[in-house]
Image: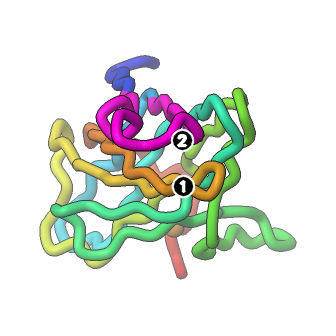
């Protein structure tokens, strides 16, 4: 389902950097809408870089705390933790999705409504250079499934 396809190229950033910086494409960026009182949510997207790169961190002017997380099974318990980086191997699509890597949106002061656009700034490193990649994730209603978002 491609509700919302957004390609963010880092051309503006590239213009002032040596040719080493990677070009990152971001597609299918979305965030999970929340119910009142729910303090956390997640943002998801597909990332692809034309050079080996790593997603180091993310931030948003509208979300108090943003972390890069990984969720995986530990025995039969689903756990998540903050990761130092998500590797973006050259030419390989890396999908941030429920149950795997995700951008954690925390300490929400108000619910995220479906349709709301969450601006995110991704910090991506490639070849020793850092660049910011701006992403707009549109919130949509999505069931949590069996996933516990417990820390
Ligand atoms: Cu998380």
Please provide percent x and percent y for residue 44: 46, 45
Please provide percent x and percent y for residue 113: 16, 48
Out of 12 and 59, give the one closest to the viewer: 12
Q: How many other residues sit within 10 Å of disc 2, few (<14), some (14-19) or many (≥20)?
A: many
User: Coloring scheme of the render?
Assistant: rainbow
**Splitting the image into 4 quarters, where does residue 81 fall?**
bottom right
Residue drawn at x 23%, y 48% is 119
Name the magenta segment's main secondary structure.
loop
* Ligand 1 within 8 Å of the CB at mark 2: no
* Quadrant location, the C terminus: bottom right
Q: Is residue 100 visible?
A: no
Please provide percent x and percent y for residue 124: 51, 53
Is residue 20 covered in magenta? yes
Out of 16 and 139, give the one closest to the viewer: 16
Bounds of the magenta segment: 8-26
Are dots 1 and 2 in contact, CB under 8 Å? yes
Q: How many other residues sit within 10 Å of disc 1, few (<14), some (14-19) or many (≥20)?
A: few
Q: Is residue 69 above or below residue 92?
A: below
What residue is shown with label 2? 21
Secondary structure beneath dot 1 equals strand
Out of 4 and 130, give the one closest to the viewer: 130
Q: Is residue 39 visible?
A: yes
Please provide percent x and percent y for residue 117: 19, 42
What residue is shown with label 1? 129
In the rendered view, does 54 fall on the left or right side of 116? Answer: right
Distance, label 1 to label 2, CA atoms, is 6 Å
In the rendered view, does 43 fall on the left or right side of 135? Answer: right
Q: Earlier in the sequence, mark 1 or mark 2?
A: 2
Residue drawn at x 55%, y 49% is 98
Secondary structure beneath dot 2 equals loop
Q: Residue furthest right?
A: 75
């Amino acid at each position: 389902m491609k509700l919302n396809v957004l390609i963010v190229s880092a051309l503006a950033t590239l213009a002032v950097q040596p040719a080493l910086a990677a070009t990152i494409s971001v597609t299918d960026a979305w965030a999970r809408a929340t119910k009142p009182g729910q303090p956390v949510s997640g943002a998801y997207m597909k990332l692809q870089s034309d050079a080996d790169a790593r997603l180091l961190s993310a931030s948003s002017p509208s979300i108090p705390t943003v972390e890069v997380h990984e969720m995986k099974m530990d025995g039969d318990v689903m756990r998540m933790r903050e990761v130092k980086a998500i590797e973006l191997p050259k030419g390989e699509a890396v999908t941030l999705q429920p149950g795997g890597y995700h951008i954690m949106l925390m300490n929400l002061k108000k619910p995220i409504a479906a349709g709301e656009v969450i601006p995110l700034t991704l910090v991506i490193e490639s070849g020793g250079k850092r660049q910011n990649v701006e992403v707009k994730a549109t919130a949509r209603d999505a069931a949590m499934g069996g996933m516990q978002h417990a820390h």
